Amino acid sequence: MQDHFIHDNRLKGATCSGPFQAPETIAISDKSPQRGLCLDLPSSHEAQHFGRTKSLRQAFPDLIPRKPYCADLLSDGLKIRGKKSALKHRHIQLNDPTIFRWMPHDIDHPGAYFAHRDANVPEPNVIAINPENGHAHCAVLLATPIARHSAARIKPLRFYGAVERGIARRIRADRQYSGLICKNPLHADWRVEWRRAEPYTLHELADWLFYEDMRPDTSVETTFGVGRNCAVFDALRHIAYREVRAFKRDGNVETFRARLERAALDINMQFPQALRISDIRAIAKSVARWTWRHFSEEQFSRLQSLRGARRSAQMWAGHVAREKTRPWGAEGISRATWYRRRGPGGAKEVNLPNDFGNGGTK
C-alpha cells in the first residue's frame, strides 16, 4: 500500500465522486450511496479542482488560531507561539479554543491515503501523510464553525460529535485522538494533498453516514471526541437540576458554579482521554448560568405538578368510568344497589388503573 501512494502518479489529484454539493436534508439519511463506490473525475475536472484547492492552501494561515499550540516533536511537549512562528513547526493546532472550524481525524494505519475512498465518505479538505509509515492526519473545513464556549448551544455540538464519530468509525481513525494538535499541512516533512477547496456543512457530511456510524458511545468509559463534551453536559445538568434550589437558598451563583465544576472534573476523569480544563470550565459555567436563571421554587412546584398530572394520565390511560358505561342499567337495578352488592365482603370485580396489572381488574 505504501509503494502505491509513493509511486503511482495516477493517484495524484484523484478524488471521490459523489453528491458533494447535495442540498441540506435531515441529519441521518437512509439514502446514502452504496458503500465502496468511488469513481475518478475526468481530467478537465481535475484541473479545475486543482486550481480551486490552491486558494485553500493560501488561506490556511487565516483559518487557524492567532496563537496556536505547536511542536516539532510531540514528545518535547507543546508550545504556544505566534501564528508566523507556529507555522514553521511540524505540528500545529487547528481549532480555536472557543469554536470548531475544522473536524480533524488521526488515521493511524498505513492505508490512510485511500481511507475515505475505501469507506465511501467525502474526501477531507486536506490530508497530511507521513511518508515513512503511511499514517496521516486529515481535516474537514466547516462552512459554519460550531461554538463550544460557555454560551454555546448543545444541539450543534451534539450534531458535530455525531458526524465526527461517524466518519472516524468509517475510516477506522484513532478514536482516542483529542484533535488538539495536527500535522502542519504547510510543513515540508509531510506529503500533503489539498483535496477540496469548498467547506462542508454538517448535513452534507451526515448524508453519507448511517445511524450505526453516528450512534452515541455506550458509556462514559468508551466516549471519545466531542461526545465527551455532550456527556459532561448531560450528566452535569441533572446534578444542577437537583441542587440549584439549595444553592439559591443558602449560596450564590459562584459557589454553585464551583460545585458544578468539581462535579464536571470528576466526570472528566472517567474518560479514556480527558477533556481540557478550559472545556470543563466552559461547560460548568454554561450549565450553572442557565440553571440559575431558569430554576426557582415556583418553577419547581409548577414542574412537579405537571409531572404529577402526566403520571396520573399514564396511570389511568384506558380506564373507563362506571358513570359512562352504567352497568347497573344493564342488570335492571339501581346504581346504589349495584355498588352495594360489590362492596366489602361481596366484591365481584373492581376496576383499577393499568399499573396494578391483570388488565385493569383485580
Image (cartoon, helix red, strand yellow):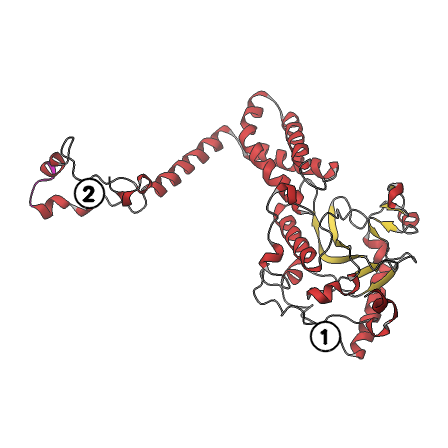
Residue numbers of the magenta segment: 332-336
Is residue 267 or residue 6 the one in the foreground? 6
Above or below: residue 241 compared with residue 359: above
Is residue 349 or residue 262 the one in the foreground? 349
Tell me what residue is drawn at x 9 percent, y 37 percent: 337
Tell me what residue is drawn at x 77 percent, y 79 percent: 42
Report which residue position mark 1 lands on.
39
Q: Main secondary structure of the magenta part?
A: loop
Q: Quadrant of the N terminus?
A: bottom right
- Residue 17 in magenta stretch: no
Which secondary structure lies at badge 1? loop
Residue 146 position within the rendered picture, expressed as x and y whole percent measured from the top left = 69, 50
Report which residue position mark 2 lands on.
322
Extreme residue in the left direction: 332
Above or below: residue 52 compared with residue 252: below
Q: Tell me if I can see residue 152 in this picture.
A: no
Please identify the quarter of the rendering in which residue 171 is found: bottom right
Which secondary structure lies at badge 2? helix
Sequence-first tag of 2 and 1: 1
Q: Is residue 359 left or right of residue 182?
A: left
Residue 250 position within the rendered picture, expressed as x and y whole percent measured from the top left = 58, 20
Tell me what residue is drawn at x 76 percent, y 44 percent: 97
Task: Name the amino acid type tagged 1.
Answer: Leu
Residue 342 position within the rendered picture, expressed as x and y whole percent measured from the top left = 14, 36
The Cα–Cα distance between marks 2 and 1, rounded to whole angstroms, is: 70 Å
Q: Is residue 295 left or right of residue 179?
A: left
Task: Name the amino acid type tagged 2.
Answer: Arg
Is residue 18 or residue 308 the one in the foreground? 18
